[in-house]
């Protein structure tokens, strides 16, 4: 759970609804109905992905000297759940948790990130419904690994 403790993940979670709008999750694209609005208008499709890619590319180069162990780039995988606004569209797309007290009130998304160990720069992420496991969300991200990378994940990823 190392990535969750990084300051950047709270910022990432804050903007999750912006990113979730057009994220491809295991063969399903989330409906545009869940797209956040800005001044009453929908944000351009793909904006979240483009912003993430721009930031991620610029953050990797300066972090390279700090993300190596014995010559290997160290990549961590970890997941967390993020609650969102109580909106029917979000509940339908992501679901809610269930406990002995009944169904939860707020929609929950499961988020898995691949990040560089030394700097916590997020290389890639996947967002899925709450009931989807971290391992299922992690597998499509593995193409981000390079030959020689040291990949570290907990038993849930």
Image (cartoon, rainbow, N blue to C red):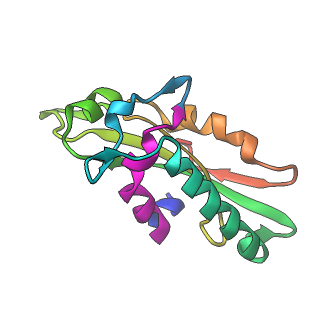
Residue at x-position 56% and y-position 51%: 113
> Splitting the image into 4 quarters, where does residue 96 fall?
top left
Q: On the rendered structure, is 9 left or right of 82?
A: right
50 up-or-down from 86: above or below: below
* Of the pair 41 and 141, the residue shown nearer to us: 41
Q: Position of residue 80 (x, y in %)?
A: 43, 49
Q: Across the whole image, how many numbered discs are drawn on residues?
A: 0
44 up-or-down from 67: above or below: above
Q: Tell me the chief SS of the magenta region.
A: helix
Quarter of the figure that contains the C terminus: top right
Residue at x-position 63% and y-position 60%: 54
Highlighted range, magenta:
7-24
Extreme-left residue of the structure: 101
Q: Position of residue 85 (x, y in %)?
A: 23, 46
Q: On the rendered structure, is 88 left or right of 132?
A: left
Q: On the rendered structure, is 18 left or right of 37?
A: right
> Splitting the image into 4 quarters, where does residue 95 fall?
top left
* Of the pair 106 and 79, the residue shown nearer to us: 106
66 up-or-down from 13: above or below: below
């Amino acid at each position: 759970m190392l990535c969750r403790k990084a300051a950047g993940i709270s910022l990432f979670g804050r903007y999750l609804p912006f990113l979730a709008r057009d994220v491809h999750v295991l063969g399903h694209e989330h409906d545009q109905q869940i797209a956040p609005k800005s001044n009453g208008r929908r944000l351009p499709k793909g904006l979240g992905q483009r912003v993430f890619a721009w930031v991620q590319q610029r953050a990797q180069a300066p972090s390279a000297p700090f993300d190596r162990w014995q010559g290997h780039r160290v990549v961590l995988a970890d997941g967390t759940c993020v609650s969102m606004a109580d909106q029917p569209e979000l509940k339908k797309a992501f679901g809610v948790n269930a406990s002995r007290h009944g169904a939860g009130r707020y929609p929950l998304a499961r988020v898995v990130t691949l990040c560089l160990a030394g700097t916590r720069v997020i290389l890639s992420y996947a967002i899925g419904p709450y009931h989807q496991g971290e391992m299922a969300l992690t597998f499509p991200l593995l193409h981000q690994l390079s030959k020689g990378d040291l990949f570290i994940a907990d038993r849930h990823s």
